[in-house]
Every structure is written in C-alpha cells, then in structure tokens.
Image (spheres, rainbow, N blue to C red):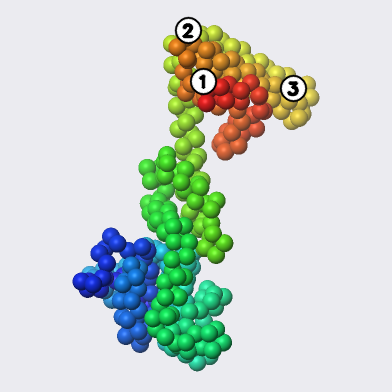
Amino acid sequence: MAMSAAFAGLASNPGPNEFKLNSFISYSRRDMDFVDRLQQALRERRIEVYVDRQHIEKAEVWWERIKQLITDADTIIFVLSPDSVDSKTCSDEVEFAEKLNKRFVPIVARDLEGRAVPAALARLNYIFFLPNLAVGASGDFDEAVGELTTALETDISWIREHTRLGALALRWETRARPSELLLRGAELNAAETWLTMRPAKAPDPTDSHLAIVTESRRAATRRQRMFAGALLTAVLGATGLAGAAYWQSQLANTAQSVAEKEATRAVRSEAATFKVTKEAQITQSGLLSEAARVISDLPGGGDALSAALLAIEGLPDETSDDPLQARRPFVAAAQLQLDRAF
C-alpha cells in the first residue's frame, strides 16, 4: 500500500523548517524496510518525505488524508517492485497525483519480474537501487540516493510554486470559487510570470492553475475599471470638468445610439453598425484622452495616476467581459497620454 507524510524525529535530522522540498512515497508495505532507509537518507539531505503510516491519525479518513499529502508534495517518488505495481492502492495514488500534474520520479527497489508499470511511470527514466548494467547502475544505495536527490532538486523553485499554487487552486475550487480566495497584487503578477517560465521537463500547469490565475486577472481588471470610473468622476468634479465631460459623454452616447438606430433602419447591416459604433468609441476615447491631458497639465505637476486611469479607459482591453470594450479601436492620443502619465 502506498505511503506518504513523514517525520522521523531523529536528533540528527533537519528541523521542520529546514527542508528544501517535500516528497510523497508511494510503495508496497512489503518494501517498508527499504522505504525506512530511503526516508532517513533523504531527510539527511534536507528532503522531507511523507509516509502515510507516520502522518495519518487513527481518527482521520485515510484516503482523504492521502490525497492531502499528495497535494502538498512537490514530487511523487514511486518505489517500483512486483508488489507495488500490483497494488490497487498504489495505482489509485498514481491516478490522483496524475490529475494534479504532479512530477513523478520512479525508483526500482526490486526486480519487476516482467510486471506492467503504470503508464504515467513507464514513460519516465527510472533510478535503479539494484544493479543494472544496461543503464550503468551499480546497485550502491548511497550512489542511487545521490542520483535521486539530483532529480528531486531539478527545477526546484518552479516545482515548489506548482505545489503551492495547486493547493490554493484546489481550495478555491473546493469552496465553489469564492472571490475572496482569488490571487491579488504581487501574488497575481508572480503567478502570471510563473506560467510563462515552465522548465522543459517540468509538469504542465493544471486546468485549476490556469482557472484561478485567469479569474484573478479578470477580477483585478474589474476592480481597476471600477476604481477608474469612480476616480474619473471625482477628478472631473474637483477640476471643474465634470459638467463638461458629462455633457460631452452624453452627446457621444446619444450620437452613437442615434447612429446605430439609423444604420439599423437604413441598411440592416452589421458592418454599418460596427462602423458607427467604432466612430463613437473613437470620439469617447478622444474625450478621455483630452481629460487625461488636462489633469496631467494641472498646476503642481498634475495627477499622474488619475491621468493614467483615464487614458486606460480610452484604450482597448482584450480581456474585458464587455465586447465593446474588448473591440474598442486603438486611439494613439490615449496611448500618448498614458505614456505621459507614466
């Protein structure tokens, strides 16, 4: 049966905050002596090893705890032996870990005697703890542990973030995706950067990874636009432009509405409606650009933040839920005022 969650508690081992990464061992209980020795050797190299016999309390729901340990692990070490590849429990652990796109490192503890290895493991390179001339394995335990340690520490920073974001995404989805559990600010920016920097041999981000980052960005954009709208009203009022800007905006909206109705009645053409809408949006973007310019030029250096937010409102936003805003034409004047503000 597979195992996870370990804490040997020996005085010579690192403290709980000194481990470089966490691993979960899936194995057959017939290989327990081997796993005990492996766990100790890895902990001495500052690699925590989860083994279920040590971290599952009697009152806990066993399989739920196993899933949590797999979720919290950076890498799944699968101890290959005839008994482990025949084990239903080990197979379930591999299946669950594969759904989370966890990194697997299969190690051979005993000759497999022709057994079929799970597909998620069969396509990977094995680390042999027994002699194998074909791959140059001597069978020396310490030598194999060194090779395993090197494999575990490869791309360690990216893998640890995969684990951390995966746990956050799983909690978010388990609780029906509440907005208060979304990523914000620097954490969101870091997650978006992380998605673009996957090492060649690292596991792919999961759909849950992508979902929480995407929805977090949408929420951030909505907050930014709400703030920009509120700030626009306040700034225009403070500078005496509120009335004029509102009047001009109403004119633009009225012109757009009339033009759309006229185009629909006269031509019934989607292309004509789009053209009129585009012209109205260009007018609006021009008004926003002019308001940004006025604010930038106020005595004392102006208000760069307010000018930037106004200019942003006049630029297209492909991520917007509003199709009109997403297709808004690019107006160079808005970009110019945004650059000035920065």
Q: Residue at x 29, y 69 (%)?
A: 61
Q: Is residue 141 above or below residue 99?
A: below
Question: Which part of the image, by quadrant, shows the N terminus?
Answer: bottom left
Q: Residues within 10 Å of mark 1 (few under 14, many from 20)?
A: many
Q: Residue at x 45, y 27 (%)?
A: 227
Q: How far apart are the alpha carbons under marks 1 and 2?
A: 15 Å
> Which of the 4 quarters of the picture holds residue 69?
bottom left
Hey, what amino acid is under mark 3?
A: Ala
- Residue carrying label 3: 263
In this rendering, the label closer to the viewer, 3 or 2: 2
Q: In the rendering, at what x and y percent does residue 55 appear?
A: 27, 70
Q: Residue at x 52, y 63 (%)?
A: 202
Q: In the rendering, at what x and y percent does residue 112 appear?
A: 48, 89
User: Marks 1 and 2: CB-CB under 8 Å?
Assistant: no
Q: In the rendering, at what x and y percent does residue 7 appear?
A: 26, 70
Hey, what amino acid is under mark 1?
A: Ala
- Residue carrying label 1: 307
In the image, which disc is placed on residue 240?
2
